[in-house]
Each structure stands twice: as structure tokens, then as C-alpha cells.
Image (cartoon, rainbow, N blue to C red):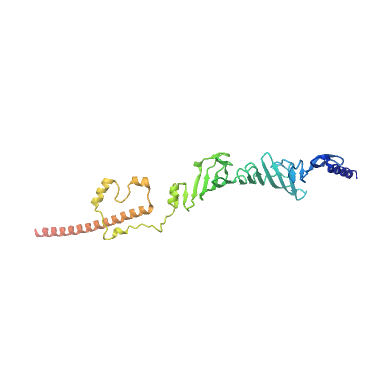
Amino acid sequence: MRNFTLLLIAVFFCSLNFGQTTNYIPKYTSSSTFGNSILFQSPSGGIGIGGDPFNGKFTIYQNGSLTDAAGSTIPLMIWSGSETGALRLSVGVDKNNNCAYLQPARAWQDYKANLVLNYLGGNVGIGVSTPKTKFQIGDIWTFHDGANDKIIGRNTYNNGSNNIRIQAAVASRMLFNNTGDIVFQTAPTGTAGSTIADSQWQTVTIKNNGSVGIGTTNTTHLTNFKLAVKGRILCEGVEVITTVPQADYVFESDYKLSPLSEVENFIKENKHLPNIPSAKEFQENGYNIVDMDEMLLRKVEEHTLYLIQMQKLIEELMLENKDLKLQIEKMQNGNK
């Protein structure tokens, strides 16, 4: 009864306010003593715990930590019960990490931040204490919202000027640029916090026109060709289904087959076959596979015609040789 009477007296004096701008309720410290104020009410009706609510309707003063155990300094907690292993949801701020956080955990256990809001850059993190980009999941998955590029990264983030490894491991990312291209990149392993140079990225690009570049972002190549590869290609087969070699005109009756003597003179003068680019031209300009196939097929067909001519000449010579043998035999028999 005595304690209850003391409580009524305390509430009465608080309500008088004595000209103060903020009402308060004394903090209970024992069965017979009220301590310093812990609950405040502002003239506008706001409630503050641990301090003046100022312009807020409900304000809690407590700087917690993302790694606090047992909720010892968590400003707001919601519990499922008091038993061992009960679930709790904690909401708080951590001025050391410049963030606010939302954390589920079991009672009396250490925990790690599940949802973190970092006010310095507006970063959001899930399962990570200090998100390095606008949105980060766990330790290595990052989502970067740049001025020109939107990036999904694994073990990498952009600090505004460089791409940085988060952990000592390989890095990869998928980039969406402002021209509509999609770029896939991988980088070798490096130390945690090290810069990934542009030259370290191995790149596959899908252009907005549907072209694909492997190891190259050459604009000219990806504008004029559907597939551009910088490096060697290994495959089991290549099939051309539209533009195919058309060299059978060599077998038409009106086709002018150059005499071999002309071919010989051309080779002596130019050091390559007629109608075939020189080695220097190949080095400077490369070549189209379809065009090259047609040139080579034309040469094979021309050589076939040359062989046919030679076969006919050989057969004629064989007949002449046979006739000469018969004549010689007759002459030899007549002299006997």
C-alpha cells in the first residue's frame, strides 16, 4: 500500500509540470525509491524514452551495436517469450557503423545484422554489417547503381573510382550499361581490398543489336559482325547455311582457263596464285571464310581441268608412241 501511495504522489507531481515544457515520469529503481527521469512527454504529445522526444511522436535513446549479445544495448526488442531459445526481433541504431538495423535472433545469443540501412550512402545490406554498395546481400553479392552502369557483382564493388575485391578470391560481375548492352566479366584472384584493373577483366559482351563479343568490345567488329572473338576458337564443326561457295562456273563451256604458262609467269612476278590475295593482304585485312572457300574451290576445279587436259595430252602421246613403235617394228621386219 505504501509503494502504491508513493507512485500516486509521483505521478501527481509529474502532472503539475511546474512550468516545464516537457512532462516526465520518474524511473523506478527500487520498492521505495524513484530515480531519474526515463520517460518524457513533450507538449506536442510525443513520447521519449531515455530523452526528450523533440518533434517525434515516439523516440528511443540508445546506441546499440550490430554485434551486441543478449540485447544488452538494443533500443527496441519484440520477444516471443521469456523462455530459453525464445525468438526476438531487434530494431536499433549503431553510430559506430553509421547505420540502422533490423535483426531477428534467439534469446541470449550473439547475432549478426540481417537488414542494415547505412545513412552515409543510402546503402542497404542483408546479412552484412557494412554494405559497400546501394544493395548488398551477404559478404560478396553487391548491386551497384552507377550513373551509367548498373552492376550485379560477386566479390567486387565500385567505390566511385575503382573496382575493389571484397575478399581474397576471384571476382565476377554482370553489367548493364546505358546503351542497352549486357557485359559479363570475370577477374582472377587477388588480395582483399585490392583494385581490379580494367585489363584484368575477361569480358563477354552482348550488344543491343544482338551481336556477341568474346574477349573484345571493339565497336566496329560488334557492329558489322554477329560474333567477334579475340583469341582462338575450338569447335567440332562450322556449318554455313546461307552464303555458300559458288565456284562451279569454272566448269561452264565459256569459262576462260588461263594457260599454265600465264600462271607460271604470274607466280614468278607476284609470288602467289592468281585471284588469291597475297600473304601480306591476309595479314592486313584477314579474310572471309566463305570467300576463301570459294577461291580455294575455284583453284581446285581449275586444277582439275588442268589435270584433265594433261590426261588427254598423255593419252594422245601414248597413242603416238604406240604408232611409232609399230612403224619401227615394221621397218625392222622389212630389213630382215
Residue 54's place in the image compared with 206, above or below, is above
Farthest residue, direction right: 1
The answer to whether residue 336 is seen in the rendering is no
| Horizontal arrangement in the rendering, residue 218 relative to residue 144 (left or right) | left
| Horizontal arrangement in the rendering, residue 297 relative to residue 130 (left or right) | left
Report the front residue among 323 and 275: 275
Residue 186's place in the image compared with 302, above or below, is above
- Label total for image: 0
Residue drawn at (44%, 50%) of the image: 223
Q: In which quarter of the image is the N terminus?
A: top right
Q: Position of residue 256 (x, y in %)?
A: 26, 56
Toward which corner of the image does residue 307 lie, by quadrant?
bottom left
Toward which corner of the image does residue 240 lie, by quadrant?
bottom left
Q: Where is residue 138 in the image (x, y as percent from the top left)?
A: 62, 46
Residue drawn at (24%, 51%) of the image: 262
Residue drawn at (50%, 45%) of the image: 202
Q: Position of residue 297 (x, y in %)?
A: 33, 55
Report the front residue among 7 and 143: 7
Q: Where is residue 70 in the image (x, y as percent from the top left)?
A: 74, 43
Residue drawn at (43%, 49%) of the image: 221
Report the front residue among 140 and 135: 135
